[in-house]
Image (spheres, rainbow, N blue to C red):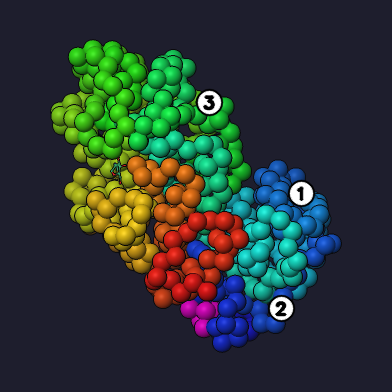
Amino acid sequence: LGGATLGWASAQRDAAAEEAASPLQSIVPVPASVTPAAGVTFTLGAGTRIQTQAGSAEATQVADYLASILRRSTGYPLPITPVSGNPADGIALLLSGAPASVGEQGYQLDVAAGVVTVRANKAAGLFAGVQTLRQLLPAAIESGSVKPGPWTVPGAKIVDQPRFGYRGAHLDSARHFFTVDTVKRYIDQLALYKINNFHWHLTDDQGWRIQIDSWPNLTKHGASTQVGGGPGGFYTKAQYADVINYAKARHITVIPEVDIPGHTNAALSSYAELNCNGVAPPLRTDTEVGYSSLCIGKDITYKFVEDVIRELAAITPGEYFHLGGDEAHATSDADYNTFMQKVMPLVGKYGKKILGWHEFVKVNPAPPVSAIPQFWGTTTTDNNVAAHAARGGKVLLSPANKAYLDMKYNASTPLGLSWAGFIEVQDAYNWNPGGYLNGVNESAVFGVEAPLWSETLVKTADIEFMAFPRLPAIAELGWSPRSTHNWDAFKQRLAAQGPRWGVMGINYYKSPQVPWP
Ligand code: TNX
């Protein structure tokens, strides 16, 4: 092959002709452009070093991350050194020389016989390039113990950048409590597929999971159970900060969600004064929705909400705060409107922008145009969401019948729910975020997010079974150009991920739609 950059499709064909199962054809999400370099191979060896952009702590952090993955399975020392001049050996991570077109999150990856170079404009791009490099190495690179190798990378030039700046995953820690370690493991898995936002559902009817100093009974009482009646749990502020830092080192921003005014039984049970009748209801461990509401007419409700937003915003570096706002069936429309008009400005007061489940955009006067509705419906028309887009607002897409990772794959799936239907892997993949909702075209799409509700999920293996392989499908919809969308090609790439998940101990669903090796 010459030096000319080929389109994705022709690169696929040429690579297919040369080498049947090249890792260059198996990258998920598929890169915008891959140009194989025939006959060229880089081999990671005992003497390989990782060079980073001199003087960049962020680039060095990416190098540390890469080294920590590669050292485990190769056993090589992989020292990290600042680059000087034009790197001629090892793996180089450079914040120079990337095309402007790859933006802040994209990268260029060049694999030559002697040197692998990742170039990006920002550290986020280096991090994305490192995820691609991981997938170009043999599956055993993901092993937690030393393996023999050889550690080869096929020669190529990859130029890649995301379709949407926001690619999210959500986890419900309220219905069932998940330990910090479980959350971190999921965050590691998100990073592998270039997801850059973690939406953390921290409160619901069955449990309040985040320490709030000014309202201590929220966790003392409100965190003490979960669906099914187990002991529940909560995150201290220190644990929350630990997760935020862990995610940040993986270029993932944490978005906390406090779901109000509905989905609040745990809070109402913790403080009698938050109830209109002054009586605290018992804690709930069932999975009903739509029965609880904060008391819209009481002043203390807004003191409570402001305290929570203030304390949580203060420990949240990300731009967004998620207000929930869904399924407020126990709140009248007028009360919902009153509530949101009072509460939305509090998010701005503490320096954050508003995210919410899409119902909140119905309020009048309309939310600020910077607010983002997260569409979770099962229809392709929503007039209030379309009106928000018509005002110039952006929309986050999580259609429940496509993107909900808690829906069963089929009738015999042991976990999950089915209110939005069954979602096989092909269903999760076969939709176009940029043309899904009427009145919400590509330019109005903020991004894509895969929610994972936990009514039926209690442990890491459960999370993984529902997320894999659908999470990578949603990740690809968020990252890869629309022109690459092709189920037959995607299912092959997905199949090639299976052995990696095997090495990583990920409990994935072996969908019959995917030709697993
Ligand atoms: C609807 S999606 C809910 C959640 C449930 C979920 C289960 C949304 C905004 N609300 O409270 O956990 O369905 O799939």
Mark closer to the chain start, 1 or 3: 1
In the rendered structure, does residue 59 fall within the stretch colored magenta?
A: no
Q: Nearer the viewer, residue 67 or 495?
A: 495
- Residue annotated with mark 3: 237
Task: Between label 1 and label 2, give the one nearer the viewer.
Answer: 2
Q: Residue 421 vs residue 30: left or right?
A: left
Residue 110 shows in the view: yes
How crowded pointer 2 is (Cα within 10 Å; few <14, some 14-19, many 20+) is rated as some
Q: Residue at x 32, y 15 (%)?
A: 271
Residue 406 position, x and y percent, is: 35, 50
SS for dot 1: loop
Asked if the residue at label 2 sits under 8 Å from ligand 1, the reply is no
Residue lying furthest right in this view? Answer: 47
Q: Residue at x 53, y 56 (%)?
A: 506
Asked if the residue at label 1 sits under 8 Å from ligand 1, the reply is no
Q: CA distance from mark 3 to mark 2?
A: 50 Å
- Quadrant for residue 146, please give it: bottom right
Q: CA distance from mark 1 to mark 3?
A: 34 Å
Tag shown at residue 54:
1
Give the main secondary structure, helix, strand or loop, of the magenta stretch.
Answer: helix
Q: Amino acid at mark 1?
A: Ala
- Residue annotated with mark 2: 40
Q: Which residues are magenta?
A: 9-13
